[in-house]
């Protein structure tokens, strides 16, 4: 197989993703691409049997060596000119993007609309690259109908991510401070800051706000839930970069009896293992290392990845995913 080209592969998400792919598929060749060759080479050396290259995002060929072929383009940094996508489409390669928020996906959507048969394109700027959405979908297995999904996520203030992730957050905040929700079946932007009290697993609460993200439409369309909301807070009361997600579900069981359930997703080492896992799951799928070939067009993580398989991998990387409550309410 030709190498997977990981743009931004020397960052936290890129290095973590490459490590997982190497563990799962030892013979899969990887190319770590970054602006700083020394950083890329350091990651490649740690992986072994990986190569390092510099990239030029201003160039349509990314400044890559002539004649080099790849199996996929994985963009883990902001590519304002979308030359990574253009390169993938020009070469008929699967493309993966993690940086475009819901208010920014228009260029990628239109690029695919104009060249619909060129490449499969995964848009995955979900919480932790889709692992939260996949965990939530797994949690719905006991439901016959899902009416409401409420996710509350808490990250340590020292664990928001590397420079690329921080740049994404700053850009999204500039584009819009509104939170996106689905309320009674209608997708609605909540203008201005939208404060929220997020319940912690220990029963306490923390102040946060409702945010926008691709998780909202992904979960809404995957389940049919008329009400979907994601709240986010930054905490600083832990000695380690704990990430904590609470998933509250309401609906009915298969017999039509009202049902309520709460699940938690926790990782003691923070968001990085969860984000790297989400990326690796999509890349594995795009390369047909698991599942059928992915057709050209736009895809999201939950449209490609089996939630049961995803939760198995979550536990492998050290996450705790447990059901806290499941009760009929009739």
Image (tube, rainbow, N blue to C red):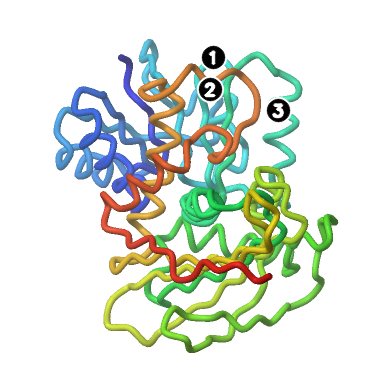
Measured as percent of width and height from the top left, residue 205 is found at 53, 87
For residue 236, what is the image quadrant? bottom left
Measured as percent of width and height from the top left, residue 39 is found at 26, 47
Measured as percent of width and height from the top left, residue 37 is found at 29, 40
Alpha carbon separation for disc pair 2 and 3 = 11 Å
How packed mark 3 is, by other alpha carbons closer than 10 Å (few <14, some 14-19, many 20 or more), is: some
The residue that appears at 61% across and 32% down in the rendered structure is 299
Q: How many marks?
A: 3
Q: Which residue is mark 1?
A: 92
The residue that appears at 28% across and 35% down in the rendered structure is 21
Residue 214 left/right relative to 3: right
- Vertical side of 146 occupied by 77: above or below: above
In what quadrant of the picture does the C terminus appear?
bottom right
**Tag 2 near tag 3, CB within 8 Å:** no
How packed mark 2 is, by other alpha carbons closer than 10 Å (few <14, some 14-19, many 20 or more), is: many
- Residue at disc 2, secondary structure: helix
Which residue occupies the foreground of this view, 285 or 39?
Answer: 285
Alpha carbon separation for disc pair 1 and 3 = 13 Å
Measured as percent of width and height from the top left, residue 239 is found at 27, 83
Alpha carbon separation for disc pair 2 and 1 = 6 Å
Q: Work out whether mark 2 precedes mark 3 in sequence or the reverse, and give the earlier one.
A: 2
Which residue occupies the foreground of this view, 173 or 242?
Answer: 242
Which numbered tag is attached to residue 311? none
How packed mark 1 is, by other alpha carbons closer than 10 Å (few <14, some 14-19, many 20 or more), is: some
**Tag 2 near tag 1, CB within 8 Å:** yes
Q: Which residue is mark 3?
A: 111
Which residue occupies the foreground of this view, 61 or 71?
Answer: 71
């Amino acid at each position: 197989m030709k190498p997977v080209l990981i743009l931004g592969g020397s960052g936290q998400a890129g290095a973590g993703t490459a490590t997982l792919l190497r563990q799962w598929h030892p013979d899969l060749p990887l190319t770590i691409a970054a602006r700083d060759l020394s950083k890329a080479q350091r990651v490649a050396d740690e992986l072994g049997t990986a190569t390092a290259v510099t990239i030029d995002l201003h160039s349509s060929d990314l400044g890559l060596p002539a004649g080099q072929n790849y199996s996929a383009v994985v963009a883990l940094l902001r590519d304002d000119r979308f030359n990574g996508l253009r390169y993938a489409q020009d070469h008929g390669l699967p493309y993966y993007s993690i940086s475009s928020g819901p208010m920014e996906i228009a260029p990628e959507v239109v690029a695919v609309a104009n060249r619909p048969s060129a490449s499969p394109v995964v848009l995955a700027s979900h919480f932790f690259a889709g692992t939260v959405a996949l965990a939530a979908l797994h949690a719905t297995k006991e439901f016959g109908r899902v009416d409401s999904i409420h996710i509350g996520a808490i990250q340590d203030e020292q664990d928001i991510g590397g420079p690329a992730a921080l740049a994404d957050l700053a850009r999204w905040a500039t584009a819009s401070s509104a939170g996106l929700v689905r309320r009674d079946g209608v997708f609605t932007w909540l203008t201005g800051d939208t404060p929220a009290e997020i319940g912690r697993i220990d029963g306490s609460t923390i102040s946060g706000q409702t945010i926008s993200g691709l998780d909202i439409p992904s979960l809404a369309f995957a389940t049919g839930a008329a009400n979907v909301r994601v709240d986010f807070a930054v905490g600083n009361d832990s000695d380690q970069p704990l990430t904590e997600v609470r998933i509250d579900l309401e609906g009915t069981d298969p017999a039509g009896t009202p049902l309520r359930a709460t699940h938690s997703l926790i990782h003691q080492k923070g968001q990085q293992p969860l984000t790297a896992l989400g990326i690796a799951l999509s890349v594995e799928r795009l390369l047909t290392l698991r599942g059928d070939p992915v057709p050209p067009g736009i895809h999201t993580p939950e449209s490609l990845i089996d939630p049961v398989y995803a939760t198995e991998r979550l536990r492998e990387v050290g996450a705790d995913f447990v059901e806290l409550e499941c009760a009929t309410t009739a």
